[in-house]
Amino acid sequence: MMKMDNKQIYKKTLCFSLRRMLWDFLAFIVLAGFCTAGFLLMNKPDSDGGGLIGLGIGLVIGIIAVVIILRYVSYTYKAGQIAMMTRAVTEGELPEDVLKTGKAAVKERFTTVALFFAATRIIKGIFNQIGRGLTAVGRSVGGDTGSSIASAINSVIQVVVAYLCDCCLGWVFYRKEQKAAKATCEGAVLFFKHGKTLAKNMGRVFGMGILSLLLIGGAFFGLFFLVFSQFPATFEKLFTEFGEVTLDDGATLAQKIGSPDTLLLIAAGIAAVILWSILHSVFVRPFVLVGVLRNYLESGMNDIPTEESFRMLDSKSDKFKKLHAELA
């Protein structure tokens, strides 16, 4: 069997990332459009906080629209990319029409979007339940320090879980002769059987994430700061309306923010992080995922989990135990 290296697989499956980017940017534009429309429509000279209310309404409507777009369209490209990465690692080659083949593989394995998200919920549920035990260790320190440690551990867990979820989906695509539920159980077991091997990837995961945040996020922060600086009156008006919002401690939101200039910086930061997350997930994360997925799949191909190995997770996760029992 010929072997495709990680760079070849990344380039060959980049078409999925580019399609996802188009839909992600569309979702971002939709969200920004609803927020802007809500603010402008309700920002009347004689209204008290109308612009802020309109902004909130637009945000809610925009989030609903974005969820619909990403749930029913973007998922196909994400899952198709994982399917083709899996095929490249396990078979050493990819077809000419990677995009069409990947989308067909998703429809074959998950005939409806509901089945796909059911599988991802099960996978995330298993790993999150086990991860909560580690978070509890942080909280046991007590006080603000314990809460900070728990939050840090939880953030790390969420990043790891996201990659494990994708790897587990890759295993489900690889084990196409098995039912998705059983393949999901096998995928969960793989991590715990070969945890040390897969843990070696985590340094690369976080290193690449931090580097891309500094470079991509920093560039967009500067861009948005320059753009937003051209509309000082808008931020002054918004800051004034924040003065009408009182928090639980009696201070207003405007007092917490400090000044219109600080509000501008916050807005630029939020916009930059949103766009960074889109570009990171489109270009950087798939490159990292290829390496993580390769180690994961090759570990499993050489040691496919057995029924006996399923029992090692029964005591660690009620969700896994339930899924395992359903297979009996």
Image (tube, rainbow, N blue to C red):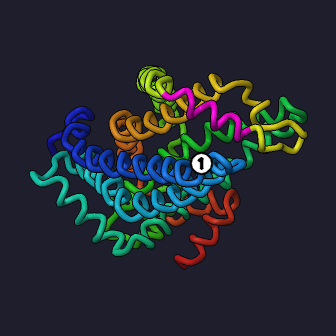
Q: Nearer the viewer, residue 244 or 145?
A: 244
Q: Is residue 327 above or below residue 252?
A: below
Horizontally, residue 124 falls left or right of residue 169, namely right
Indicate the amino acid at tag 1. Answer: Asn
Q: Is residue 240 above or below residue 129?
A: above
Q: Nearer the viewer, residue 213 or 303?
A: 213
User: In the rendered view of the protein, which quadrant contains the N terminus?
Assistant: top left
Residue at position x 77%, y 43% in the image: 244
Residue at position x 70%, y 35% in the image: 240
Residue 180: image quadrant is bottom left
* Prevalent SS, magenta region: helix
Q: Which residue is mark 1?
A: 43
Residue 295: image quadrant is top left
Region rendered in magenta: 231-242
Say how many tags the image has. 1
- For this orientation, the residue located farthest to the left is 96
Horizontally, residue 54 falls left or right of residue 212, namely right
Is 238 included in the stretch rendered in magenta? Answer: yes
Measuring from the top left, give residue 198's x and y in whole percent.
Answer: 48, 38
Measuring from the top left, give residue 219's x and y in whole percent.
Answer: 42, 21
User: In the rendered view of the protein, which quadrant contains the C terminus?
Assistant: bottom right
Residue at position x 46%, y 46% in the image: 32
Measuring from the top left, give residue 39's x and y in whole percent.
Answer: 56, 48
Specify few, some or many for label 1: CA neighbours under 10 Å numbering under 14, 14-19, or 20 or more: many
Secondary structure of residue under mark 1? loop
Q: Is residue 158 above or below residue 272?
A: below
Horizontally, residue 19 falls left or right of residue 294, namely left
